[in-house]
Image (cartoon, rainbow, N blue to C red):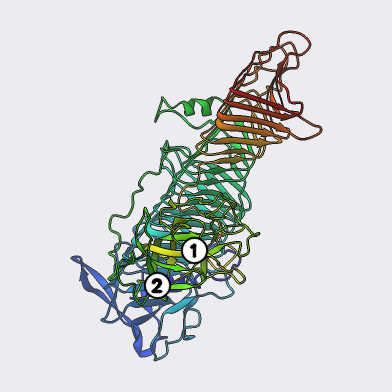
């Protein structure tokens, strides 16, 4: 079967020209009239010429046959309501091409089908209209387009505007659709269009208020010069593209794999009280509007945007997201350059991610972000409470009460269980059967023969004294060792893993050593996947990051240390030990062969007195159920950005945070790094980390600056709390009000350092600017260190008493004038 959809994807997106408003005429008596352009090979219509599923139908016969392709040409082509029209499918025909050379659009008001398994490509430059009762009965793929013609790789054009008979030679796979200087006409659909394989509609504008379904294939909608409006779509994978606006109102979009939504201007999403909006992708969900993304979908309690993989919103304009989002991998708000983008929400945003979160600046209503991985944000400004959320689903959830009663921020990273996880979408019930030889698996633990697939078959058994005793491939020094695998299915998703043995005096990033830095590299089909340094000594290493991208302690992410038995007693030249790392990779692959190159070092990098080896390697290639999607060949290119296969460390990194009197809750299983300050304007501030809280030169301030109420409490809990160079926790009372308490509890240490000669001093400050009473300050930690101008104090202004100052510590260190 010709892979028509994939072939035409390369050219179905023609030049961007001004949109044409197409106004359909009133339908007349449906008529199918062959033209004379095919001469003796012209088409013929046999009324009631075939019985399909027990019902008679008109049969279109004859046409010009060229190899596995069959061509038909019509002066006009219309199907009346209740009428059934099928193209005959002679033996050996895999694709049927049909063109309309007249001047009228095609009204498809009944059933259009193929009496066989061939694909149908239907082009009418004047427009295509599918009525409310329109149906497709096509087991293969269908492409409906208002292009001028189809271009083939041998230069032949099957044109509707300059019609000629196809040459008497074999027609190869089509390259794409051809467009002239005129605006492509519109395609509208009000019916139910379902096919057995791929479904594609390409016009100047595309409006589908009916149903589009390719349960076993790919769905593609392209409006080349204007807007696209799509209501319902179901497929294994889908791409919806509009040169101007992509309008999704009351849409229900479900894919088993990737769902990609693209607009040259704005992606606009709306639900209604009667009908929810749904965009559920079993794979990645990618939404890009060059000028903006406008989402308002809050009329229903469910989560409208869900992805089993990554979920990305990308624009250089305003990204407005009033909806709930759930992602099974990374969630990212980006600009077109792939950098963190600006996010707005006026009513009710909730983001739940089984992975990492990356957003730029946020402005809007109360925000809840929960993630099993890390959270990285820009400036956050909370302007009002959540006005759309309700607690009907879980009346006991305290978060809902906080978010709806005050302008609050809640961010939790590294969580074990998500409150709003991805729920299984209503996936297609009959996915396509896997092709023959759809899975390839290679594995080797090197306990027997290595095989000719390896360029170097050297093996060694670990020495006496090993805890992990095995035979592995190696040891190697500066050799490049290659693994070549053939007869892979294609296209395929390739995944793999292996154990990397790092043996000897690897000194990582250390450039002072004779042979440093020690870089090890993995390349797959000449593309570098791992380019990292490793350390078995006290120097830093880059892994798990690439060289020059990270500084980590030696043995970072190692699975085992000094268990292979390589010590100075076994090999005198190797005065250091060994370590084992698990390396994993995953990629889309389109070739039938795969080559992995290990230790292919950059020029100038030489390994001396260090060795490495490979063990327990596995490579699996499976035919992708959803082939990779090629975006339109215009400015709407997908930006490149780092994705996380696994959730990272559970940290939170933020810039400035401001709420208008609402709470700020930061909860992380790893570090919380405050690059900017926090201003709650009287709201409580709660910061909890299972690791460290770090702030330099920023102020965490719960003061009610308007003097209209009390200042909020500040609670910080962590293993260690470090404030440096002007960083301070501040709760100041204005007027005759009550100041907030400051509580810092650290299971290891609290470190307050200030090396600056002037400016705000580092510390904990509960103060009063008026007659109000300042709050209390409480510090509990085994070790409290104050250096330089750092201070801890509570003081009243002019009159009244200060708050209570209580410090519980086993060790207090005051250096350089610090005070409490």
Q: For numbered disc 1, what is the local secondary structure?
A: strand
* For residue 689, side relative to residue 109 (left or right): right
Looking at the image, which residue sits at the far left? 54
Q: Residue at x 22, y 73 (%)?
A: 50
The quadrant where residue 778 appears: top right
In the displayed structure, 542 sits above or below 346; it is below
Q: Quadrant of residue 2?
A: bottom left
Q: Which mark is residue 222?
A: 1
Seen as rendered, the residue at the extreme top is: 800
Between disc 2 and disc 1, whose residue precedes? 1
Residue 185 in sight here: no
**Numbered tag placed on residue 687 in the rendering:** none
Q: Left or right: 31 with respect to 292?
A: left
| Crowd class of label 2 (few under 14; some 14 to 19; many from 20; radius 10 Å) | some
Q: Residues within 10 Å of mark 1 (few under 14, many from 20)?
A: many
Between circles 2 and 1, the one closer to the viewer is: 2
Q: Nearer the viewer, residue 119 or 784?
A: 784
For the C terminus, which image quadrant?
top right
Find disc 2 in the rendering and name its residue.
Answer: 458
Query: Up-down: is 699 above or below 636?
Result: above
Callout 2 secondary element: loop
- Indicate whether 234 appears above or below 738: below
Indicate whether 468 appears above or below 438. above
Residue 593, image quadrant: bottom left
Task: Return the x and y of residue 538 as percentages of the image width and height.
Answer: 57, 51
Locate the N terminus and report the quarter of the image it occupies.
Answer: bottom left
User: Distance between the Cα atoms at labels 2 and 1?
Assistant: 55 Å
Residue 93 falls left or right of residue 646: left
């Amino acid at each position: 079967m010709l892979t028509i959809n994939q072939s035409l994807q390369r050219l179905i997106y023609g030049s961007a020209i001004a949109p044409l408003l197409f106004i359909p005429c009133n339908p007349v008596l449906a008529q199918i009239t062959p033209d004379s352009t095919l001469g003796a090979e012209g088409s013929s219509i046999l009324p009631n010429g075939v019985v399909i599923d027990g019902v008679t139908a008109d049969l279109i016969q004859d046409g010009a046959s060229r190899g596995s392709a069959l061509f038909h040409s019509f002066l006009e082509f219309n199907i009346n309501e209740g009428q059934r029209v099928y193209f005959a499918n002679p033996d050996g025909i895999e694709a049927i091409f049909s063109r309309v050379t007249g001047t009228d659009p095609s009204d498809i008001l009944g059933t259009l089908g193929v009496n066989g398994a061939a694909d149908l490509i239907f082009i009418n430059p004047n427009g295509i209209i599918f009525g409310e009762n329109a149906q497709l009965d096509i087991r293969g793929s269908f492409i409906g387009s208002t292009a001028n013609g189809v271009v083939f790789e041998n230069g032949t054009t099957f044109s509707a505007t300059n019609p000629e008979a196809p040459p008497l030679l074999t027609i190869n796979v089509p390259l794409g659709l051809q467009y002239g200087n005129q605006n492509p006409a519109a395609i509208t659909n009000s019916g139910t269009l379902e096919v057995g394989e791929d479904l594609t509609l390409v016009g100047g504008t595309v409006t589908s208020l009916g149903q589009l379904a390719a349960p076993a294939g790919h769905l593609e909608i392209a409006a080349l010069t204007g807007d696209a409006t799509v209501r319902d779509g179901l497929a294994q994978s889908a791409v919806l593209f509009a040169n101007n606006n992509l309008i999704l109102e009351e849409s229900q979009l479900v894919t088993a794999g990737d769902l990609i939504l693209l607009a040259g201007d704005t992606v606009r999403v709306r639900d209604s009280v009667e009908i929810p909006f749904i965009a559920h992708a079993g794979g990645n969900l990618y939404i890009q509007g060059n000028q903006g993304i406008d989402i308002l979908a809050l009329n229903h309690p469910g989560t409208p945007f869900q992805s089993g993989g990554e979920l990305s919103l990308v624009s250089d304009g305003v990204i407005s997201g009033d909806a709930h989002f759930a992602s099974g991998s990374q969630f990212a708000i980006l600009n077109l350059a792939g950098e963190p983008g600006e996010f707005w929400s006026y009513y009710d945003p909730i983001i739940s991610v089984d992975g990492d979160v990356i957003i730029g600046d946020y402005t809007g209503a109360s925000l809840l972000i929960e993630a099993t991985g890390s959270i990285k944000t820009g400036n956050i400004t909370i302007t009002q409470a959540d006005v759309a959320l309700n607690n009907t689903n879980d009346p006991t959830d305290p978060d809902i009460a906080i978010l709806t009663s005050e302008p609050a921020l809640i961010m939790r990273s590294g969580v074990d269980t998500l409150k709003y996880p991805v729920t299984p979408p209503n996936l297609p019930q009959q996915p396509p059967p896997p092709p023959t030889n759809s899975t390839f698996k290679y594995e080797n633990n090197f306990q027997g023969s290595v095989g000719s697939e390896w360029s170097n078959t050297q093996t060694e058994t670990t020495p006496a004294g090993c805890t992990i005793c095995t035979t592995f491939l190696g040891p190697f020094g500066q050799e490049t060792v290659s693994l070549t695998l053939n007869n892979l299915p294609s296209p395929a998703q390739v995944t793999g893993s292996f154990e990397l043995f790092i043996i000897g005096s690897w000194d990582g990033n250390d450039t002072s050593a004779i042979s440093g830095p020690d870089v090890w590299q993995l390349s797959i089909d000449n593309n570098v996947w791992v380019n990292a340094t490793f350390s078995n000594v006290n120097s830093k290493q880059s892994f798990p990051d690439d060289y020059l991208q990270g500084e980590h302690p030696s043995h970072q992410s190692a699975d085992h240390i000094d268990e292979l038995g390589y010590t100075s007693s076994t090999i005198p030249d190797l005065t250091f030990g060994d370590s084992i790392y698990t390396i994993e990779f995953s990629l889309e692959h389109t070739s039938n062969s795969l080559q992995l190159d290990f230790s292919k070092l950059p020029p100038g990098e030489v390994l001396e007195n260090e060795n490495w080896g490979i063990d327990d390697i596995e490579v699996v290639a499976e035919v992708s159920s959803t082939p990779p999607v090629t975006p339109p060949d215009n400015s709407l290119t997908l930006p490149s950005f780092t994705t996380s296969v696994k959730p990272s460390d559970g940290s939170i990194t933020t810039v400035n945070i401001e709420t208008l009197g609402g709470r700020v809750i930061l909860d992380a299983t790893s570090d919380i790094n405050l690059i900017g300050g926090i201003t709650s304007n009287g709201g409580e501030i709660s910061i909890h980390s299972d690791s460290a809280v770090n702030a330099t030169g920023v102020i965490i301030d719960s003061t009610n600056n308007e003097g209209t109420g009390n200042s909020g409490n500040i609670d910080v809990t962590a293993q260690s709390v470090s404030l440096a160079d002007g960083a301070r926790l501040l709760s100041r009372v204005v007027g005759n009000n009550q100041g907030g308490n400051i509580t810092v509890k650290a299971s290891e240490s609290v470190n307050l350092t200030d090396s600056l000669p002037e400016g705000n001093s580092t510390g904990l400050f509960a103060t009063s600017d008026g007659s109000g009473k300042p709050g209390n300050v409480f510090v509990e930690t085994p070790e409290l260190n104050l250096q330089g101008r750092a201070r801890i104090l509570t003081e009243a202004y002019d009159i009244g008493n200060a708050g209570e100052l209580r410090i519980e510590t086993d060790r207090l260190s005051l250096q350089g004038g610090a005070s409490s």
